[in-house]
Amino acid sequence: MQRLGLGCLISFPRSLHECGSVGLMLGHRGYITGRPFMGQRAPQHIQNIIIRDYCHKNGLHYLLSVTEHVMPDSYIILNQVINELENLEGVVIYSIFQLPEQDELRHAVYEKVLKQKRSLHSAVERLVIKAAEDVERVEDIWCVQKIIQNHLLNLEELQCKN
């Protein structure tokens, strides 16, 4: 337990598993990363502010964010959170583009969320995945972003040749 101002106490679980086992109130776990995603980068404290604000505006009980490892293509922490959804109402990620770029891995996340009848929120894009139709919408956005990114890479290559 840690004492905050005005005599308030706050306790932090030692692990994600502990969140459900000690009978803490269910809520939405934040998920952030320190590495770039789809050519974007946001400081971790800003990601947390955006997620906390999203939860507040949408009436979601915000649980402290977990932070993904910085190694490229590491989704160890995301998978841990997804595998422990039975102890959560859902997950709030900073951006949908923090999900795995590999289609199979991203779809596995969607499937686990839907199978557990939980929700996956994206704070920046203000999207919620609760049903298969929501996945289709998010995947359409992913496709557009990939096309834009490929187009920009091609333009950069042309500029370098000139």
Image (cartoon, rainbow, N blue to C red):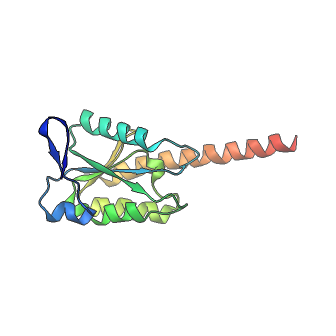
Q: Residue at x 32, y 61 (%)?
A: 81
Q: Quadrant of residue 78?
A: bottom left
Q: Is residue 55 visible?
A: yes
User: Which one is in front, 105 or 59?
Assistant: 59
User: Which one is in front, 48 or 121?
Assistant: 48
**Which x, y percent locates residue 36?**
55, 49
Q: Residue at x 34, y 41 (%)?
A: 51
Single out the residue that lies furthest toward the right. 162
Number of marks in picture? 0
**Which x, y percent locates residue 113?**
30, 59
Q: Is residue 79 left or right of residue 118?
A: right
Q: Is residue 130 visible?
A: no
Q: Quadrant of the C terminus?
A: top right
Up/down of 58 relative to 128, above or below: above
**Which x, y percent locates residue 29?**
28, 52
Up/down of 112 relative to 133, above or below: below
